[in-house]
Image: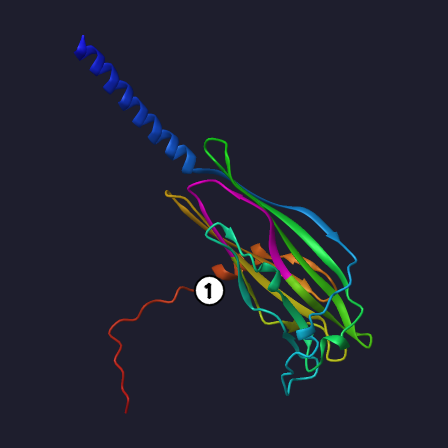
Amino acid sequence: MKQIILTIIFSLAGNFVYAQKLDDNSYFQIKNVKAEILEVGEESIPLKLDANLNSYEKVGPLAVGAIINTGAQAWNIINNGQPNVNISHYYASAMPSPLTWAEVVNWKGPKKIIYSLQFENLMGITVLDMKYMVSYYYDGNVKGKGHYIANFTIKPIEFNIKWGFKFNMDIKISNPMNIGTENDPMAYLQADLNWSFSSPLKKYNEFNTYAVKGNGEFKDITEISKELTKGIPVVEKQENVNLNWN
């Protein structure tokens, strides 16, 4: 009788371990990734100037129509599943130089684009549910000339992640360009949004590229960037290179 009871107990324990392994694999394996634009809108909120930015450092001499980034060039948005608590302090601006912020007026916006990013596992559970917002002011000008960009930023507005998963997101801003003329500059900013999502079984790395013009136009050029990246040849390692310092 004791032998039968022990056999039943060991059998149940073995089935439990087997089922647990199946559940772990199903829990950590991703079935579907969904990314989409939820909303595109614009508000009419006056741009508040930081007192420290009313007289930012002037860089010179620069060419006529030169545009510089008076904000940050890169920052972290989410680190290991934790949103950056100081995210409100980070933004990029494409401004004329040498000028002060007070000389650039008639701002429009902010324009806002809200994205959704979701990961679903094999059990049908949404293990990552995130919404983030791209926002910026645009069309600032100096005496009726120019189209500049201010306070461009990307920040999370909702973020939920399940146990056992990790997520990181950061942004890098390219140097601004003038795609207009010397007399009527048009600012252009490009931002690379990099993110990684990982479980004990696999890691996913991806990026999105956004382009903003001083007239307010916004484009997601991710696919274009990926195609351009494919064309970059892999740098091959050279071995046994002889150097001659004479």
Residue 80 locus on image (x, y percent): 45, 52
The amino acid at mark 1 is Ile
- Determine the secondary structure under disc 1: loop
Q: Nearer the viewer, residue 228 or 87?
A: 87
Residue with the most extreme right position: 144
Q: Residue furthest top?
A: 1
| 201 w.r.t. 112: above or below | above
Please give the range of residues in magenta: 153-169
Which percent across, then down, holds residue 209?
58, 58
Q: Nearer the viewer, residue 156 or 181?
A: 156
Q: Residue at x 53, y 61 (%)?
A: 228
* Location of residue 21 with respect to 207 vertically, above or below: above
Q: Is residue 198 left or right of residue 9?
A: right
For residue 224, side relative to residue 7 (left or right): right
Render colour scheme: rainbow
Q: Is residue 202 above or below residue 12?
A: below
- Residue at image mark 1: 232
